[in-house]
Image: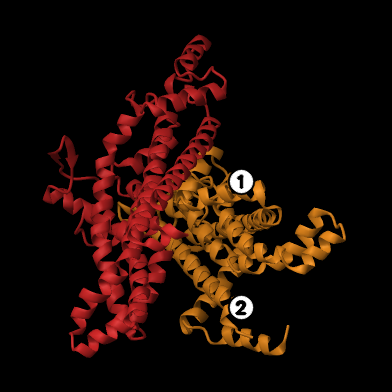
Chain colours: A red, B orange
Amino acid sequence: MPLISVVLGRLSQAFLLLIAMSLIGFIGVHSVGNPVFNVVNIETATPEDIRQATIALGLDQPIWRQYLLFINNVVRGNFGTSYIYHLPAFALVMSKLPATLELACVAMLIAAPVGTGLGLLAGRRSGTIFDRTVLRSSVFALSIPSFWLSMMLILLGAILTGWFPSGGRGTTARFLGQEWSFLTGNGLWHMVLPALALAIPNVALIARLSRSGTIEVENLDFTRFCRAKGLSSRRILLRHTLPNISVPIVTIIGLQFGGMLAFAVVVESIFAWPGVGKLLIDSIQLLDRPVVMATLTFISVAFVALNALVDLFYAVLDPRVRLS
Amino acid sequence: MKPAMKADILKGLKKPPLGPVLTASKILLASYILLAIAAPAIAPQNPYDPLQIYGWEASSPPGTMGGGGFRYLLGTDGLGRDIVSTILYGLRISLMVSVTSAAIAALIGLTAGVSAAYFGKWVDAAIMRLVDLQLSLPTILIALIAIVTLGPGIDRIILALIIAQWATYARIARSVALSETNKSYIDAARLMRLPTARIIFRHLLPNSIAPAVTLIPIEVGHAVALEATLSFLGLGVPIDKPSLGSAVANGFQYLLTGQYWISLFPGLALFGLIASINLVGEDVRRSLDPRNHPA
């Protein structure tokens, strides 16, 4: 069964990836700063207090034992307790997840249709002024650092015009035991700018991809046949070209969704959006090791899992992948 | 080089697909480099010297006459530093960090990729697994993990950027070197019992270098953006010697109260730098790619 071997191969590869990452990340995070001084007050603590705190945090053990302890805990979903918030680190990450997820989803809901649409139109009329404009602005959209894009959105959308709020989540509503912003008008209003900041580079990426796909498909015999049959060009574009370019587009949407989790770090910090990314940066600055580890592990696992899913999806959809 | 081929390359350089935009970005990039080199001579103020900075002039709007006897054309930042000078000095740091890291990353990546191709077996497997691991994650995530691990500082950020970027070169160098290792000049070198290091560095590397080297300009652009992002997040260069990214970050809190100039102007400089590097880099890659110049 080639499909099963592809699945198993892909999963073991993903697993090895995670082990390697956890090892590198663990050693790294543990060689920075002394977190004891975040728990005790440097000015008033006695050596005995410091010793007590070191033992309480498990920092007196040799580093390999700390790693084994860490892995043992990770497998059981236990990343330790945050030094700052005194809450379980993993639960803390999970509590911030809805905010990140809804932002990434809304951004993708903007990016996918807009990007595909622009790409289809540009590919259909390749060489025209519209096509060149799409192509050129996509180069710029992809080369703007996301933090600067976010700041310009704040400057234009919030400070100069006052149309949108410059940060925060706004009013949230309870659904499935979590707080969500997209359920209230005010929350959606708060989402517009950060979602745009995440969406714009993806619009450019998807547009380029669907443009090149469209140009390729438009030259194939079946589209010529459709045209000879007298179908309207809109129908050809939507019913015949679009399905044929959809596999790479769906793939890139899957991959970029994982990428958004990483880029959320930047966008969330700027828009004060209380998600996983902002938690990561805050925890790095506060030397809150368990939370840094839990967040980095979570982002990596989510990314690796998404990648594996996309690959498998590809293998199911396209028989050629199974053979190679 | 055959004259016909040379003419082809020149033609490729002379007929750029983006035309005037490309010419403009070449001029822009050249002036960025000149400004960065000449910064200490032409900047009206040394932003690292506390004696030249007047705290009471913090956040002056553009065009204010300063106590140092010159006009703050683009205003001052929250510490009273002249924005023009901050941009010029920041440009130096941004370019220095990104060019250094791209060059070292290229060197390491090339050596790793060529060695993987030459030795094969477990060396190849080990190096390429590491490369796959890195390329399957977003660069920003790798850089974040690296900088969290290494801690702050300019040397650390260069190291983090090298860690984030070497894998791209390694993959390309390996694919080229794989086909080179089968050629007879490598067999000849082996039969002559040349030392392995000599075969790799004097024979294999020079013949596998071209495709990876054409990547360097684009990777410098990525490095500028990455460094700026890390510095913006407060994980990059220290605040007293700002790069363009940290200059933008310094002004962010003032942006919300309407003092837009502190982050707008360094940000524009940064955007121009990245865009011009990307456009020129893409053009360099295209015109050096042998596939675009059939002999």
Inspect the image, locate mark 1, and give the three-letter code of the amino acid beneath it.
Ala
Question: Do callouts 1 and 2 mark residues in contact (Cβ within 8 Å)?
Answer: no
Residue at 46 percent across and 80 percent down: it is B21
Inspect the image, locate mark 2, and give the three-letter code of the amino acid beneath it.
Pro
The extreme right residue here reads B192
> Which circle's residue, 1 or 2, is located before the other in the chain?
1
Tag 1: Cα neighbours inside 10 Å, few (<14), some, or many (≥20)?
few
Residue at 61 percent across and 60 percent down: it is B99
Badge 2 marks a residue whose secondary structure is: helix
To which chain does the residue with label 2 belong?
A: B
Q: Nearer the viewer, residue B94 or A202?
A: A202
Q: Which residue position is annotated with label 1?
A: B126
Count of numbered marks: 2
Q: Quadrant of residue A296?
A: top left
The reply to whether residue A158 is in sight is: no
Q: Nearer the viewer, residue A267 or B206?
A: B206
Q: Is residue B137 left or right of residue B47?
A: left
Q: Quadrant of residue A163?
A: bottom left
Q: Quadrant of the C terminus of chain B?
A: bottom right
Residue B165: % across, % down: 56, 54
